[in-house]
Image: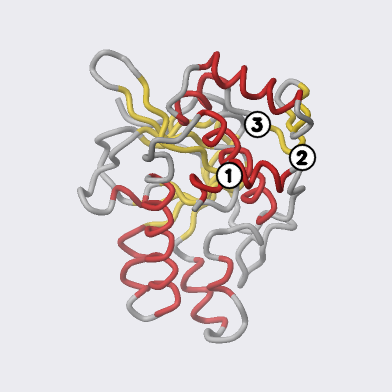
Amino acid sequence: MTARKPALRAINPEGEGNEFEFCGTCAFANVCLPEGYDKTSLAELHCLIEHVGPYGANEHVFRLGERFGAVYAVRAGMVKTCLVDEAGREQVLGFHLPGELIGLNGVYAARYPCDAITLDTTTLCRFSFPAMATLAQKLPRLQEQLFRLMSKDILRGSMLAGDFSADERLAAFLVDMADRHARRGLSAVRMVLVMSRTDIANYLRLAAETVSRVLRKFQDEGLIAVDRREVELRDPDALRRIGRAVLR
């Protein structure tokens, strides 16, 4: 079964970039800085982009084993990447916010090595990877950004590989999510976690009951405040200290 064919949308919605600039949160926004490339180069880069969506919650952007041909930048919403084994057990690999890329891990095998599933109403930018790779040969900064993003994917994938405690894992998760929200220009201390507690637990390699227990503990200690899916970091420095071994 293949992912649903997404609807195409206009490339330049109001307030989200223009003819020669990416949206401010885009993973390639810094490629579009005025210095280095003229408008012709930027226009050529924009020819590679299709705006796709909206997707509803729990829809596939791509599926494990599908032929790789594009990477996607989240514009709005959130996407979960995951694997499901033959017994139906799911392993959550990551959560991706606006401005972040999904699909780069399909480069090596030329097939997507996981599923990408929307967690709420989501829109994305689709970048043709073959065309982007060709253009990157002419635009060194684009090539550099691609390598940097691939490197970040590898680092984030190994972040939880150590023998860390539940407190360390959850504190690092909250700080990392807050930092990523801040890079989007949003609040660095208040965020809505649209993923389920079960998905968070799966990603952190913990039991769902353990995640709930540690969240209550952090709340009792005054480190966070939780209101359903909204979380406020009341002592982010303390959380960063708890999670420093994971965050490295």
Q: CA distance from mark 1 to mark 2?
A: 15 Å
Considering every residue shown, the one lying at the far left of the view is 109
Left or right: 131 in relation to 126: left
Query: Camera-side residue: 187 or 137?
Result: 187
Q: Nearer the viewer, mark 1 or mark 2?
A: 2
Give the label on residue 190, or none. Answer: 2
Which comes before the other along the chain, label 3 or label 1?
Answer: 1
The residue at the point 59 percent across, 86 percent down is: 35
Query: Mark 1 belongs to which amino acid?
Result: Leu
Query: x and y percent of residue 233 in the render?
Result: 75, 39
Vertical side of 231 occupied by 97: above or below: below
Q: Which residue is mark 3?
A: 193
Left or right: 38 in relation to 184: left
The residue at the point 79 percent across, 31 percent down is: 222
Query: x and y percent of residue 22 in the render?
Result: 60, 64
Give the label on residue 19, or none. Answer: none
Query: Mark 3 belongs to which amino acid?
Result: Leu
Q: CA distance from mark 3 to mark 2?
A: 10 Å
Local SS, label 3: loop
Q: Which residue is mark 1?
A: 97
